Image: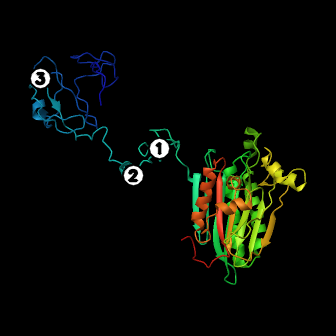
Amino acid sequence: MSQMPQQAALPKCPSCAEPVEPGDLFCGACGHDLSVVPEPPQDHPTLTITGSPGDGVDWPVPEPGSAPPAVHVPADLPGTDSGGAPEHGSAPQPAGSGVRFDRPAEPDEYPLQAPDPRVAETVAAPEEPAQVCVACRAGRVDSDGYCENCGHAQPRERDHMERESGPVAAVSDRGLRHHRNEDAFAVGHTALPDGTPAAVAVVCDGVSSATRPDDASAAASRAAGDALLAALPRGTHPQTALHEAIVAAAQAVNALAEEPATAREHAPHQNAPACTIVGAVVTSGLLVVGWVGDSRVYWVPDDRGAPAARLTEDDSWAAQMVAAGLMSEAEAYADERAHAITGWLGADAYELEPHTASFKPDRSGVVVVCTDGLWNYAETAEEMSEVVPPDAAERPLHSARVLVGHALDGGGHDNVTVAVLPFPAPPQGAGSA
């Protein structure tokens, strides 16, 4: 370690520590005899010699019987660098003053520590491969989800979701106008206590004017789906099970509003998370639907000569106008207030009134469970029947993709979510071809 140069200090009296001049025989302050050789200190410091005998300086006489200290000239020792390693090619120094080395060599003042193996492992860990842009296929994606090359926003996990579970499948897409997907779904299949197969689908649409609508739809669909798949194998009637599943979904959404009071203080104008819900349960001979809000269920028979049907009634302003006889259906749904809902799940809901209905179709077909992101482009049962593929019962996932594509081709103004269930429910293990 480098240090600043310092001037040599005058020698001090060993008795009173007052400075004395070189050559003084007695201390001018206390009269101590400076010719007396003091006992060497225990730590044996290295002393720099500034002269040699015969240069006119009186040197202390060594005690009888003591061996003179070994004296080395600089050329007798190899040079070292700042780390203590021998220095190669150091030129010999001319003989002159010597240095006493009458004590063991001291360790380095600042020894280098061995590297921490934990740090070495962290540094050596391979980096994850960079995400490549889905648009230009060349640029890297930054932490905000945008391409550094073309600036294209990358799709998020919920922007497009697909799932198939036995005979039921669902697809959800962000659409072409919304910045995120606020829909969610749950699908599954199980068996009743007698072994009869059962398929379930739940579709939820987040209320965009509410806080965290995407969290609301995700919580509701998950809670309802789990409740159905737990209740049906226990022997709960499908209609009762669906009613209880909607109640469980409502409780899950209500729980999202249970936040600290300080959070409300910082955002006093935010309302509670909310969403709509619609679900269907299909068994070998029974079809049950349940809903709150304006998401729908359609029945489309395999025999397209038979009439299709809409199995739900919207909780909306338009539906109320039609039910009251104040407007025709065409007039009501053409109004800008048509999609204002009058029922939803959430802590701000006026009252929870789950609707359920059961049907026993006399022929095979498919059940379409969807948000208004689809039925805006196929509103009537006849229009929905026209866009459902003829092989929907055998290929439910493909059919759900086709229906989402139909909405996107029509403009994709909203999030689109569709679930397709064959009726009657086929044996377990059956799925899309």
Q: Which residue is mark 3?
A: 53
Looking at the image, residue 186 lies above or below residue 68: below
Q: Position of residue 367 (x, y in %)?
A: 69, 67
Query: Of helix, strand and loop, which one carries label 2?
Result: helix
User: CA gap, disc 2 to disc 1?
Assistant: 30 Å
Task: Tell me the kind of residue under disc 3.
Answer: Pro
For label 2, the crowd category at 10 Å Cα-Cα, with few meaning under 14, some 14 to 19 and many 20 or more, is: few
Say if 298 sits above or below 269 in the image. below
Who is closer to the viewer here, 186 or 30?
Answer: 186
Quadrant where the N terminus is found in the figure: top left
Say which residue appears at 90% left-offset and 54% top-offset.
324
Tell me the element at label 1: loop
Quadrant of residue 4 within the rendered picture = top left
Q: Residue at x 77, y 62 (%)?
A: 291
The spot of residue 128 in percent (x, y) is 42, 51
Q: Residue at x 24, y 37 (%)?
A: 83
Cα–Cα span, label 2 and label 3: 59 Å
Residue at label 2? 118
